[in-house]
Image (tube, helix red, strand yellow):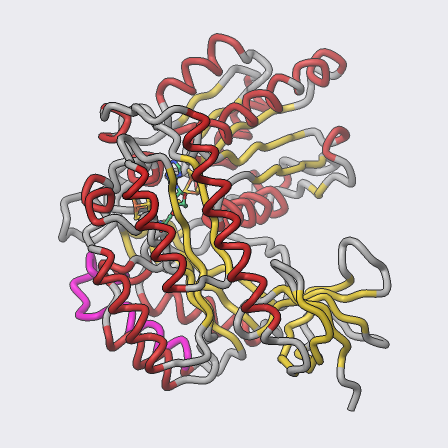
């Protein structure tokens, strides 16, 4: 597939023989990494259920255990390999159990070699491009009990009509595109997820309409760089068109994730301002405040472009909340360049930020750059940045005290039985007390207390 070619689209079909193969057997899925993986796990779960497997109460009792993995940073990988190591005694006790490793780590040659050599307990390894083939691979393994490695190249296709078992009934992730063509020099995603390819607008809208018809309230449109939606379909300003059509479905809440400053257009901001069901929160990763570092990262924008975009959005939608991603300790980052990032944080006063120490990924251009920043300096920069980010996050949250926000209830809080949790329209995590509400209810909550990364409140009973 070259830049302007459309991805091949096929329709998924489950054969009658395949649909009974899991009768009486159970499965468990462990998901690492980003929302792309969370959504893929929902498909894998849907596939297993349509093969008659049921979900195990506890992972250790499952007949099939899947690890859907992430390769974004080295520590993510090391953690997974450690956990895979822990499966060894389980396999010894019950050799009938089937262990599957899929997701982004499976797309890395080096990792597959390691797994083959050192982790005999892993039975099936398959990549991010062939979820639709998983039933076949599993059936094949159950039949022959011979290790399977099935990892496709990075070109990528699109398969529509795959079953899905969603985590929530009231909110859903909806893929709008797969892969990434941006090739930021530090990032492994273009290698693990392949070329950027967009789903057809009619397929996306159909999924949203069906979800809404089944009682769904909120959709999050997913892509590594949603603002580039439709480029491969030769659409003009595709994301703006798509966003407007999604708003017109009348679903209560629309979010999207992740945005890239390079492809953001003014028309997208205008559509966001026009429709009330497009939520006023934006995740806009900046990565660094230094123009030299942004250049070395191949991000395709300068800090002033980021500021202009931020200002335009704030001007058109004053109540917008902003979150971001930042990497510290990129190869040869100077103290001055790092301070540019602090300055950017001072200007944008993010509501929250995911901050990371740069992690070299084999095969990426940055991994070949001289990385001369000592580990303690990187750690110290991360701490300084986190302190700054935390200060603004808290200040922002304090502005909510005494105000009433609309919350989509996710259910009972994990930490406290009498407290419910959900997200406000501008994506603040809100823990609140109420007499009785259910997951999927949209309720009004009066905020009584601000924390650094969440708000506490009481539901306003009518
Ligand atoms: N497509 C999204 C990001 C996906 S990865 C975007 O471009 O914004 C999520 C975040 O992980 C990135 O925004 C970046 O901050 C971080 N990240 C990616 N590669 C990394 C690396 N090699 N080391 C440290 N952090 C990294
Ligand atoms: Fe990685 Fe850059 Fe693509 Fe985001 S845009 S997934 S950081 S290459
Ligand atoms: Fe990780 Fe793959 Fe997502 S590397 S961040 S799971 S696209």
Question: Is 167 located above or below residue 122 in the figure?
Answer: below
Residue 220 rendering spot, x and y as whole percentages: 48, 64
Q: Please check the rendered image and state whether residue 285 is part of the magenta-colored stretch, yes or no.
A: no
Q: In which quarter of the image is ligand 1?
A: top left
Q: Name, please, the residue furthest toward the top.
A: 117
Q: Name the magenta segment's main secondary structure.
A: helix
Residue 40 rendering spot, x and y as whole percentages: 49, 46
The residue that appears at 20% across and 60% down in the rendered structure is: 231
Question: Is 108 located above or below residue 337 in the figure?
Answer: above
The residue that appears at 39% across and 64% down in the rendered structure is: 348
The residue that appears at 66% across and 14% down in the rendered structure is: 88
- Residue 241 appears in the figure: no
Left or right position of 305 against 34: left
Question: Is 454 located above or below residue 459 in the figure?
Answer: above
Left or right position of 441 against 154: right
Q: Name, please, the residue furthest toward the bottom.
A: 462
Q: Please check the rendered image and state whether residue 236 is part of the magenta-colored stretch, yes or no.
A: yes
Residue 81 rendering spot, x and y as whole percentages: 55, 21
Image: magenta residue range: 229-247
Q: In which quarter of the image is the C terminus?
A: bottom right
Residue 266 rendering spot, x and y as whole percentages: 24, 75
The residue that appears at 73% across and 75% down in the rendered structure is: 448
């Amino acid at each position: 597939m070259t830049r302007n070619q459309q991805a091949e689209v096929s329709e998924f079909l489950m054969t009658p023989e395949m649909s009974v193969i899991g009768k009486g057997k159970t499965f468990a899925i462990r998901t690492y990494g980003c929302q792309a993986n969370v959504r893929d796990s929902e498909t894998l779960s849907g596939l297993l259920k349509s093969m008659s497997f049921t979900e195990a109460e506890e992972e250790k009792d499952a007949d099939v255990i899947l690890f859907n993995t992430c390769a974004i940073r080295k520590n993510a990988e090391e953690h997974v390999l450690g956990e895979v190591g822990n499966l060894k005694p389980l396999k010894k006790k019950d050799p009938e159990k089937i262990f599957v490793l899929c997701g982004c780590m499976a797309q890395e040659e080096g990792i597959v070699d390691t797994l083959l050599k050192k982790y005999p307990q892993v039975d099936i390894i398959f990549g991010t491009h062939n979820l639709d083939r998983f039933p076949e691979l599993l059936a094949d393994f159950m039949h022959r009990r011979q290790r399977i490695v099935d990892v496709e190249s990075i070109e990528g296709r699109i398969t529509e009509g795959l079953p899905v078992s969603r985590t929530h009934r009231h909110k859903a992730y909806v893929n709008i595109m797969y892969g990434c063509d941006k090739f930021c020099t530090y990032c492994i995603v273009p290698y693990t997820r392949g070329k950027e390819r967009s789903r057809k607008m009619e397929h996306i809208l159909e999924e949203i309409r069906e979800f809404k018809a089944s009682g769904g309230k909120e959709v999050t449109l997913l892509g590594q760089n949603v603002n580039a939606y439709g480029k491969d379909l030769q659409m003009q300003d595709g994301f703006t068109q798509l966003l407007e059509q999604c708003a017109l479905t009348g679903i209560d809440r629309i979010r999207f994730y992740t945005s890239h400053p390079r492809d953001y257009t003014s028309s997208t901001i205008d559509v966001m301002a026009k429709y009330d069901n497009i939520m006023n929160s934006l995740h806009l990763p900046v990565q660094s405040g230094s123009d030299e570092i942004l250049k070395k990262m191949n991000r395709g924008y300068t800090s002033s472009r980021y500021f202009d975009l931020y200002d335009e959005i704030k001007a058109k939608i004053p109540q917008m909340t902003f979150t971001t991603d930042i990497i510290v300790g990129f190869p040869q980052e100077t103290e001055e360049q790092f301070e540019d990032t602090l300055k950017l944080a001072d200007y944008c006063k993010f509501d929250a930020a995911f901050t990371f120490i740069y992690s070299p990924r084999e095969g990426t251009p940055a991994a070949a750059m001289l990385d001369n920043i000592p580990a303690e300096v990187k750690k110290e920069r991360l701490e300084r940045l986190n302190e700054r980010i935390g200060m603004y996050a808290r200040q922002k949250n304090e502005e909510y005290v005494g105000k009433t926000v609309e919350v989509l209830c996710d259910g009972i809080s994990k930490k406290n039985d009498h407290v419910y949790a959900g997200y406000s329209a501008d994506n603040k995590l809100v823990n609140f007390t109420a007499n009785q509400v259910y997951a999927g209810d949209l309720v009004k909550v009066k905020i009584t207390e601000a924390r650094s990364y969440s708000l506490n409140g009481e539901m306003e009973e009518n």
